[in-house]
Image (tube, rainbow, N blue to C red):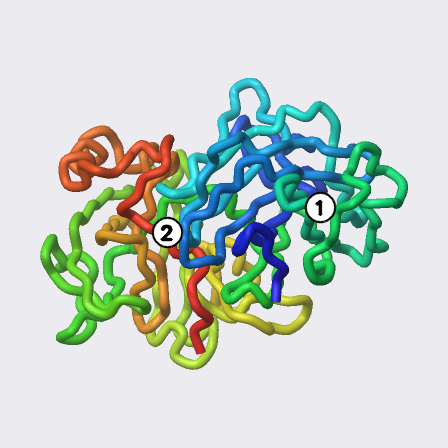
């Protein structure tokens, strides 16, 4: 079980090598750089936690970031600190309750060959610690490279081991706080869409996504029947796909992710996340939400290069939920920067009318839409 500080805050994600052979452009400036490295914290408790004053420490770099005073993290929400945003780039917007910040630290912090991450609470004089790639466990209190660290601090529990780093992927803490995996970095919510023909589980059985409308009920993993609050659609032509290949959906063949997972072929947008058994080395060992693009290369998961025109469909409920498409647990729309860029002004204006209490722009935290990017393990 991951160690917690301030009664529920865990180290949940580490991107150590954004610009290796494979890369990840966190700030979206078009170039993967060392500054794209990030560390994410998550609130695994049932209540809001003030994380202001928490300090990020590294051997050799010392204290390189402090969370601003008064920063409140809601249950299930994340706090992500990106080391350095380049000119022309921007911070990932995150989900409605997520908080994203830039450290502005001018030097690389995380050593992708192996390193320790230390989060220190000066109020309680205690810290949590994580390591990866078999790095030796640091001693922040009396060891080298931690000049200025508290000489009286105590460690909470034991050091979390995030396993091994993979170029361009992040090391993540899975559902329940006791399993680790590598996968597509998730410093912010990406826009997620179902393709025409996907069948969504409802109280009366599976229904085609294109036949669902506002007020229709769908079955969610965690909250039973929930009503659809908004639906959106974007038509994608072969010309669109030729000009922008990233619009092509990911095709998941029936049974590609396990027995009846999905029950029939399913097409989703590349960053749409599903609940499945996650890759861990040569085997699959744990469950969690993972972007389907990171499953490419597995038998039965491929880019749909047919070029045929299709439509992307979006569903928004009162909360970010996990629903069932062709029997496969998949997430519903989560607002943020990518949603704004994909949906367009008219659809975003409609969302603002339907969800007046939310910050649909994704720039500020909101209270009503609670993300469940990491939910209970599904067996």
Q: Residue at x 61, y 67 (%)?
A: 1
Q: Quadrant of residue 365?
A: top left
Q: Which residue is mark 2?
A: 371
Q: Residue at x 71, y 53 (%)?
A: 130
Tag 1 and tag 2, C-beta contact below 8 Å = no
Q: Which residue is mark 1?
A: 118
Does residue 206 lie above or below 311 as drawn?
below
- Residue 53 in the image: x percent, y percent? 58, 35
Question: Mark 1, residues whose alpha carbon is within 10 Å: few (<14), some, or many (≥20)?
Answer: many
- Residue 246 in the image: x percent, y percent? 44, 42
Q: Residue at x 21, y 38 (%)?
A: 357
Name the residue at the bottom extreme: 259
**Disc on the earlier residue, 1 or 2:** 1
Give the camera-side residue of 332 and 162.
162
- 107 sits left or right of 335 in the view: right
- Residue 259 in the image: x percent, y percent? 43, 81
- Residue 194 in the image: x percent, y percent? 30, 55
Does residue 241 lie above or below 35 as drawn?
below
- 301 sits left or right of 336 in the view: right
Name the quarter where the C terminus is drawn.
bottom left
Q: Quadrant of residue 303?
A: bottom left
Q: Quadrant of residue 327?
A: bottom left
Q: Secondary structure at mark 1?
A: strand
Cα distance in 3D space between marks 1 and 2: 26 Å
Name the residue at the right extreme: 144
**Residue 324 appearing in the image:** no
Does residue 92 lie above or below 311 as drawn?
above
Q: Secondary structure at mark 2?
A: loop
Q: Residue at x 46, y 58 (%)?
A: 45
In this view, the mark in front (1 or 2): 1
Question: Mark 2, residues whose alpha carbon is within 10 Å: few (<14), some, or many (≥20)?
Answer: many
């Amino acid at each position: 079980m991951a160690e917690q500080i301030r009664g529920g805050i865990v180290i949940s994600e580490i991107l150590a090598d954004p610009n290796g052979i494979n890369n990840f452009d966190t700030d979206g400036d078009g170039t993967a750089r060392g500054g794209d490295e990030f560390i994410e914290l998550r609130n695994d408790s049932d209540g809001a936690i003030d994380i202001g004053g928490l300090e990020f420490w590294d051997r050799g770099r010392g204290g390189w970031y402090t969370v601003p005073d008064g920063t409140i993290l809601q249950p299930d929400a994340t706090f992500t600190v990106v080391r350095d945003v380049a000119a022309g780039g921007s911070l990932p917007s995150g989900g409605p309750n997520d908080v994203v910040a830039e450290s502005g630290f001018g030097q690389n912090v995380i050593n992708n060959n192996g390193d320790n991450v230390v989060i220190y609470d000066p109020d309680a004089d205690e810290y949590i610690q994580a390591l990866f790639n078999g790095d030796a466990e640091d001693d922040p209190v009396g060891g080298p490279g931690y000049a200025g660290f508290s000489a009286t601090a105590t460690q909470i529990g034991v050091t979390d081991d995030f396993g091994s780093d993979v170029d361009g992927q992040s090391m993540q803490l899975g559902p329940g706080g006791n399993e680790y995996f590598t996968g597509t970095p998730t410093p912010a919510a990406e826009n997620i869409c179902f393709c025409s023909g996907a069948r969504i589980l409802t109280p009366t059985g599976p229904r085609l996504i294109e036949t669902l409308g506002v007020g229709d009920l769908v079955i969610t993993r965690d909250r039973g029947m929930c009503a659809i609050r908004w639906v959106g659609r974007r038509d994608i032509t072969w010309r669109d796909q030729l000009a922008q290949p990233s619009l092509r959906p990911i095709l998941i063949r029936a049974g590609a992710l396990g027995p009846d997972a999905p029950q029939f072929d399913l097409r989703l947008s590349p960053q749409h996340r599903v609940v499945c058994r996650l890759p861990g080395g040569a085997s699959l060992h744990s469950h969690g939400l993972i972007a389907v693009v990171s499953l490419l290369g597995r038998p039965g998961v491929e880019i749909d290069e047919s070029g045929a025109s299709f439509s992307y469909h979006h569903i928004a409920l009162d909360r970010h939920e996990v629903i069932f498409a062709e029997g496969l647990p998949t997430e519903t729309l989560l607002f943020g920067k990518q949603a704004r860029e994909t949906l367009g002004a008219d659809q975003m204006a409609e969302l603002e009318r339907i969800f007046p209490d939310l910050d649909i722009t994704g720039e500020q935290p909101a209270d009503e839409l609670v993300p469940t990017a990491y939910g209970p393990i599904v067996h």
